[in-house]
Amino acid sequence: MMKRRIGTVLGLGALLMVTGCSQGGTGIALLDEPATGQLEAPAWEGIDPQSVRFVADHEGVSYYLATPADPELDGGLCLVAGEPGAIACGGPSPDGPPPGSPVLTLDFGTGEAAVFRDGADTSELTDEGWTQVHENLLVRDSHRVS
């Protein structure tokens, strides 16, 4: 009986540790990776320059993920569409987005981009015409928007 209680307590403790860690971060492993080299990215306002990570090029637009420079947005996320120079930043959400929902979106006139946490099921959006250019990034041309 005592072994069962200890096992249950240890199991619950491990579960709390796992859920606690996933709540606190962005849920995007790319941002935890070290920079692969000097990025020749312009000085984007509001972004921590050390956190900028290249995500993908798609149809002439370079996409980057980064973290906000504002300490009040600690744990937040920024998406940059490098060639119209559009930026969207958001703070962390204590509950996170609903499953299958983007963490952050960016509409930059000629297109849209949506950022998802690692492992998110984005099949509904790809069925609607979005293109997955990276595990964490889906894009679509504004001409396809209905």
Image (cartoon, rainbow, N blue to C red):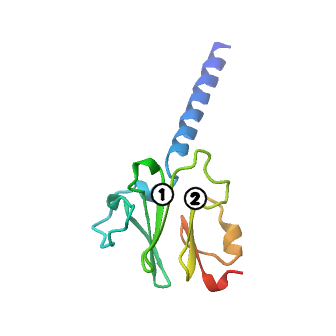
In the rendered view, would you say 93 is above or below 130? above
- Residue drawn at 40 percent across, 48 percent down: 71
Earlier in the chain: of badge 2 and badge 1, it is: 1
In the rendered view, would you say 145 is above or below 69? below
Measured in 3D between alpha carbons, the distance from the residue under mark 2 to the one under mark 1, in whole angstroms, is 8 Å
Instruction: Give amino acid for label 1.
Output: Leu
- Residue drawn at 48 percent across, 53 percent down: 76
In the rendered view, would you say 143 is above or below 77? below
**Residue 128 at x, y = what percent?**
71, 75
Q: Nearer the viewer, residue 22 or 146?
A: 146
In the rendered view, would you say 3 is above or below 24? above
Residue contact between numbered discs 2 and 1, judged by CB atoms under 8 Å: yes
**Residue 59 at x, y = what percent?**
50, 84
- Mark 2 nearby-residue class (10 Å; few <14, some 14–19, many ≥20): many
Instruction: Give amino acid for label 2.
Output: Val
- Mark 1 nearby-residue class (10 Å; few <14, some 14–19, many ≥20): many
Q: Nearer the viewer, residue 74 or 4?
A: 74
Q: Which residue is mark 2?
A: 103
The tally of labels here is 2
Secondary element at image label 1: strand
Q: Is residue 13 left or right of residue 84?
A: right
- Residue drawn at 38 percent across, 61 percent down: 47
- Residue drawn at 52 percent across, 52 percent down: 27
Secondary element at image label 2: loop
Q: Is residue 121 left or right of residue 137?
A: right
**Residue 29 at x, y = what percent?**
47, 55
Image quarter (top left, top right, bottom left or bottom right) of the C terminus: bottom right
Q: Which mark is residue 77?
A: 1
**Residue 57 at x, y = what percent?**
45, 78
Image quarter (top left, top right, bottom left or bottom right) of the N terminus: top right
Q: Nearer the viewer, residue 53 or 96?
A: 96
Q: Which corner quadrant of the image does residue 33 belong to?
A: bottom left
